[in-house]
Image: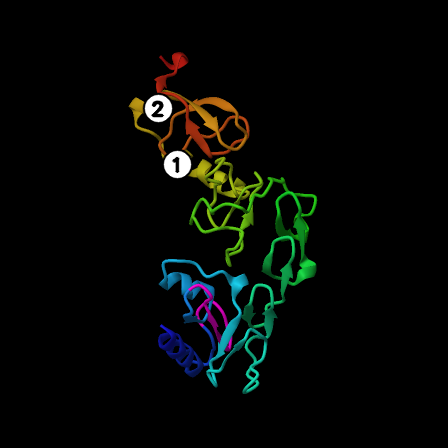
Amino acid sequence: MAASAREDGARSQKQGRRGCEHYDRGCLLKAPCCDKLYTCRLCHDNNEDHQLDRFKVKEVQCINCEKIQHAQQTCEECSTLFGEYYCSICHLFDKDKKQYHCENCGICRIGPKEDFFHCLKCNLCLAMNLQGKHKCIENVSRQNCPICLEDIHTSRVVAHVLPCGHLLHRGYRCPLCMHSALDMTRYWRQLDDEVAQTPMPSEYQNMTVDILCNDCNGRSTVQFHILGMKCNICESYNTAQAGGCRISLDQQ
């Protein structure tokens, strides 16, 4: 596996980059768990049946001279720079992305640092424009993304803070509380036009149904339509049917 990792590094250099698909770096990590060499912890975890503890890494191997040495930013043998950014705690080597190590998160984050603050209740670094303007949920990032199931706290993919306070990587509706993740007003108006232009067959035109709105939690009785049922309270189409269809009494 060590030879394979070196070959991957050599191919990357020929292609004009160093490291792997995850990080740009000039060294391989020596995994303390199995003594194998990998470009990064993600490459290790994708090929082994166990996970690499980034905090326990003690040694690295230079991709140029192949000298195994104590983890540091520059090769002691050939002076190769292992990473423009280096964290001696996370043993993260990478090109400069304005990273910073957050002591409260316990890991490195992509910055710049001045654009973020650490919310002690959410226990996560958030954009400064959310300070005092987000709904706090204790330790909200200490869970997997409900969409892709990746650990949110340590993920390299930025998580979005929804109006409901939950986090996820992608999607238009929170799968935990079902609230809309974005301002859907424009889309709801488009649905208004589609519903107006798509009349239901005559046998369904007098059908009504009880619905529960996932956005305002209100209940309404509305005309049934296959494209969606609009909440009478907040005008959202993010609704769920709360009962069977029935013929409206004033239309009988």
Q: Whole-percent x and y of residue 195?
A: 41, 34
User: Identity of the amino acid at label 2?
Assistant: Gln
The image's mark for residue 241 is none
Front residue of 138 and 77: 77
| Residue 32 falls within the magenta-colored stretch | yes
Q: Whole-percent x and y of residue 77?
A: 54, 86
**19 left or right of 131?**
left
Q: Residue at 30%, 24% (x, y): give it.
A: 202
Q: Residues within 10 Å of mark 1 (few under 14, many from 20)?
A: few
Residue that numbered label 2 is attached to: 205
Question: Magenta segment range?
Answer: 20-33
Residue that numbered label 1 is attached to: 197
Front residue of 56 and 219: 56
Residue closest to the far bottom: 78
Magenta highlight: main SS: loop
Q: Whole-percent x and y of residue 56?
A: 53, 63
**73 left or right of 9?**
right
103 up-or-down from 139: above or below: below
Q: Residue at 41%, 81% (x, y): give it.
A: 10
